[in-house]
Image (tube, rainbow, N blue to C red):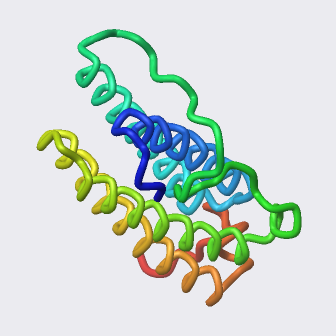
């Protein structure tokens, strides 16, 4: 992270990152027919939207204003960095590996920003976001493992594909 970023720029970058993450996980959810798995990615997208709201609230509190945060330009060391590379846009294994990497980057970004924060409440929010991103990373590692065990089921299972055994 650039040492010259202001707290408001860090928050702006985080907001953009969280918005990008929500779109990224929404893209993955659209690829999957398995309702149970699809719901996991839809929930992950909702959590990322929630993070953006947390950061927007922090921004407004810091400015003591209802002003909407500006979009921060550039290519920060944030989790999502926007677009999905064309070579993996329809490759779930590649997307999951990229998601894991991006969650690691998000965690590092938030921890570094928290360390540099001069406002205790801002530092707390940033540390909490880093913790949540670490949880997302762990979840995505498990999801990748499950996908690699049975790709067809992971992507396409329907309620009808489950076999009922017993009374």
Give the percent coordinates (x, y) of residue 140: 50, 72
Taking the image as shown, residue 109 lies to the left or right of residue 60, namely: right
Seen in the picture, residue 115 relative to 58 is either above or below; the reply is below
Q: Quadrant of residue 110?
A: bottom left
The quadrant the C terminus occupies is: bottom left
Taking the image as shown, residue 3 lies to the left or right of residue 76, namely: left
Q: Quadrant of residue 153?
A: bottom right
What residue lies at 64% left-to-right and 53% top-to-bottom? 81
- Seen from the viewer's position, the closer of residues 163 and 115 is 115
Which residue is the extreme one toward the bottom?
A: 149
Which residue is the extreme one toward the left?
A: 120
Give the percent coordinates (x, y) of residue 37: 56, 62
Give the percent coordinates (x, y) of residue 166: 44, 80
Taking the image as shown, residue 82 lies to the left or right of residue 146, namely: right
Which residue is the extreme one toward the top?
A: 66
Give the percent coordinates (x, y) of residue 42: 54, 48
What residue lies at 39% left-to-right and 64% top-to-bottom? 107
Seen in the picture, residue 3 relative to 68 is either above or below; the reply is below
Which residue is the extreme one toward the right?
A: 87
Seen in the picture, residue 158 relative to 116 is either above or below; the reply is below
- Seen from the viewer's position, the closer of residues 156 and 116 is 116
What residue lies at 24% left-to-right and 14% top-to-bottom? 64
Question: Number of labelled discs?
Answer: 0
What residue lies at 47% left-to-right and 48% top-to-bottom? 43
């Amino acid at each position: 992270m650039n040492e010259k970023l202001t707290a408001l720029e860090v928050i702006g970058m985080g907001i953009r990152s969280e918005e990008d993450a929500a779109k990224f996980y929404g893209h993955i959810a659209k690829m999957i027919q398995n309702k149970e798995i699809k719901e996991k990615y839809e929930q992950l997208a909702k959590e990322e939207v929630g993070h953006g709201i947390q950061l927007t609230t922090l921004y407004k509190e810091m400015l003591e204003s209802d002003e909407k945060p500006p979009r921060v330009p550039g290519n920060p060391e944030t989790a999502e960095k926007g677009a999905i590379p064309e070579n993996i846009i329809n490759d779930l294994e590649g997307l999951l590996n990229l998601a894991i990497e991006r969650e690691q980057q998000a965690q590092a970004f938030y921890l570094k920003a928290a360390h540099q924060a001069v406002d205790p409440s801002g530092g707390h929010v940033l540390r909490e976001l880093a913790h949540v991103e670490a949880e997302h990373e762990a979840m995505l590692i498990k999801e990748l493992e499950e996908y690699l065990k049975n790709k067809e089921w992971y992507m396409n299972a329907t309620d009808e594909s489950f076999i009922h055994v017993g009374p």
